[in-house]
Amino acid sequence: MTSVRIIRNGRIIDPANHEDTVRDLHIDTEGWISRDCPDENIISPNAIIDASGKWVIPGLIDLSARFREPGHEHKADIHHESLAALSGGVTSVCIPPDTNPVIDSPAVVDLIRQKCRGRTVPRIFPLGAATVGLKSAQLSEIAALKDAGCIGISNADMPVPNNQMMRNIMDYSASHGMKIFLGTQERDLARCGCVHEGFIASRMGLAGIPAASEIISITRDLALIETTGVEAHFCRLSTAQGIELIKSAQQHGLPVTADVAVHQLFLTDNDIGGFNSNMHVLPPLRTRRDRDALRQGIIDGVITAICSDHQPHEADAKLAPFAETEPGMSTMDTFLPLILKLATDNIIPLKALIKCCTSHPAKIISKSSGSLSPGFAADIAILDPEPEWIYNTDNGLSRGKNSPFNGWLFTGRISHTLLAGKLCYRRNLPEHGPP
Amino acid sequence: MNHPLQPDQAGSLKHFLTIEGLKREILVSILDTAEPMTEVTDRSIKKIPLLRGKTVVNLFFEPSTRTRTTFELAAKRLSADVLNIAVDTSATIKGESLLDMLRNLEAMHVDMFVVRHPQSGAAHFIAQHVAPHISIINAGDGRHAHPTQAMLDVFTIRRHKPDFGALRIAIIGDILHSRVARSQIHALNTLLTGEVRVIAPKTLLPVDVESLGVKVFYNLRAGLKGVDVVIMLRLQHERMQAGRLPSEHEYYHRYGLTRDRLQLAKPDALVMHPGPVNRGVEISSSVADGSQSVILEQVSHGIAIRMAVMSMALDRTRAAS
């Protein structure tokens, strides 16, 4: 049973409601944000969180994070990755379907729900596989996946090379009101590559993935979206040209959205030097020009979501020559810190950034969340904007230590995370339950 | 890009992973050290005791005859004990990891690994994870680097034409997949060569290859004009299957080095090839065996250069201990 709570005297930053004021925030007994001020005489002092000097923002919504369960428990698990998410203020997470077994049937969705039961976890929204086993040969039971609770469908990082198959996926999804989450790599140009095709790849003798891979993929999918009328979201843009394509489609009235992985807003192919396998990620780190275009894409509102693209790995997955390592970075521990860094470094305004990890992704997954409006679930992150700290993967809560941000200096840290009004993370105290 | 792994704190060579980033003085000292080594090879008793008591492991994850045997001979002429290990990569991928294999070999108290591996960056990876007393010599990693080959090539050039600043050098063929070409380009540029050219169709050139410091020619005749050294690269048959070239026939007609075409270069131009030679594919027999060819010299210089590099790397460890 949740009790009434007051978050006292915090700086409420709720860009979706154009609010930035210092005030109290109230939560009712059902875990909803409330307009009414409860009678302070009847609530316990434990239910009052002193947020003086702190920021109170909506809980973050991450459009892509791998928790590796089921099937890849040697890399990570729901328990640890949930703690990492909640300790970083993330209260909702979309899970791509490339688990093992793949999320291509309601049974796997149920399995994930079972594994979450009895644990402190954020809200978990699975994406259903577009094709059986992600093999692009046969449609999944998309309607059944929707009934089981999938919020959209996706072929994860597996391109769908056959144009007719992609059209069928889109037509069928549109028939059932399912949104499609699209990857942006064309199979043949991306197949052997592990880094951006450019002079860094040429120097290092690593096979490259040209920007054209993304251009071809987005161009084809935009044409099919227009034909089929499916609701679509483009995942993990990496090139300046990709942004231009999305922008022009939006200008022509196509209701498509796009996101970017947080690491793409910082790193470039120049950071791969010395064959650092923690920089092996797909889509690959591109050029400085691409990175700057991605940043500008957020400022211009072409890209409306930033996700962690969290991909924890066991140490062995990264202990091999570069091209033989598994792609992906563990980024959950630094998701919000990196987003805040874009504001403290004066790269992107804070309000735009907060929208990109709260209200905008909520809209993309059609959920009434991501803001502090009365009547919304009290998914709330409270952060202390002052402290400077250095990220050390050894102290991170994610089991994935494959972070390229080890040793980076950050400003600002989550102090409390509330999920439906319940305190589910508090720094320096045990992570389970309220004190 | 810097490679802090290569020279140790005192500035001597610890590992030899790539030419890129090495100072000109280091390259020159390798070349100078190799000079007397060629004399050892000419003696009736071809052994000097520089590495007596040291153990060198040739760890080859790719088939090789020439490179492996010259490394083996080089180590033996320096009086080291040599162990040859040929690993079938298809067997290692799923079973023992590269790192496990290294740990096991380390436990046998070896002093140096000479590594060839099909993946770019493999030698760096091993150097990063190996016990600190062990030296790593890169004998070819993927498309990335083959530094001893490049050193023996510049050694051969220097013996004939010592003033690099006055030279125009053309590298012809599959630059894209060639670790040899990448290392040659870095070595030639570090030695301040007048002009380095690459000649190939775009399907065999890396993107932005100009950024490596070369002038690009798609036309062989134009590229050969006035050059002092012609370096041919081996064309792998797989390139046709991958759709990068229509046929060996057309390749030979456009990019093969024939006696006629060689006349576009300077009259005393050297003809080089890292081997093994595909006669009638990238080079005609009459040119490969002709008077301007130094292909066999390259092979014997390979032993001297490898002796130089090995002794420099292991001498350093001895000095430190």
Image (cartoon, coloured by chain):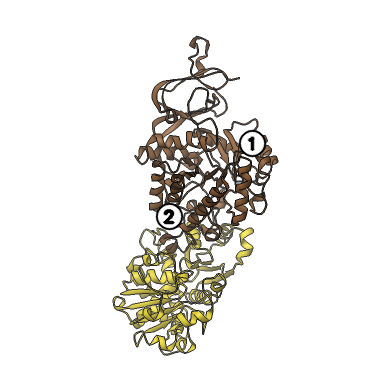
Chain colours: A brown, B yellow
Residue at the right extreme of this rendering:
A107
Q: What residue do we see at 39% from left, 32% from top?
A: A387
Crowd tier of the residue under label 1, counting other residues whose Cα lies within 10 Å: few below 14, some 14–19, many 20 or above: some
Residue assigned mark 2? A269
* Kind of element beneath mark 1: loop
- Residue type, mark 2 in image: Asp
* Kind of element beneath mark 2: helix
Asked whether residue A192 is in view, the answer is no
Q: What residue do we see at 56% from left, 52% from top?
A: A317
- Residue type, mark 1 in image: Gly
Horizontal and vertical percent position of residue A332: 51, 40
How much space separates mark 2 and mark 1, taking CA atoms? Answer: 38 Å
Provide the chain ID for the residue under circle 1. Answer: A
Q: Do discs 2 and 1 belong to a common subunit?
A: yes
Q: Quadrant of residue B17?
A: bottom left
Asked whether residue B119 is in view, the answer is yes
Q: Quadrant of residue B207?
A: bottom left
Q: What residue do we see at 29% from left, 78% from top?
A: B166
Residue assigned mark 1? A149
Q: Is residue A159 left or right of residue A215?
A: right
Q: Nearer the viewer, mark 2 or mark 1?
A: 1
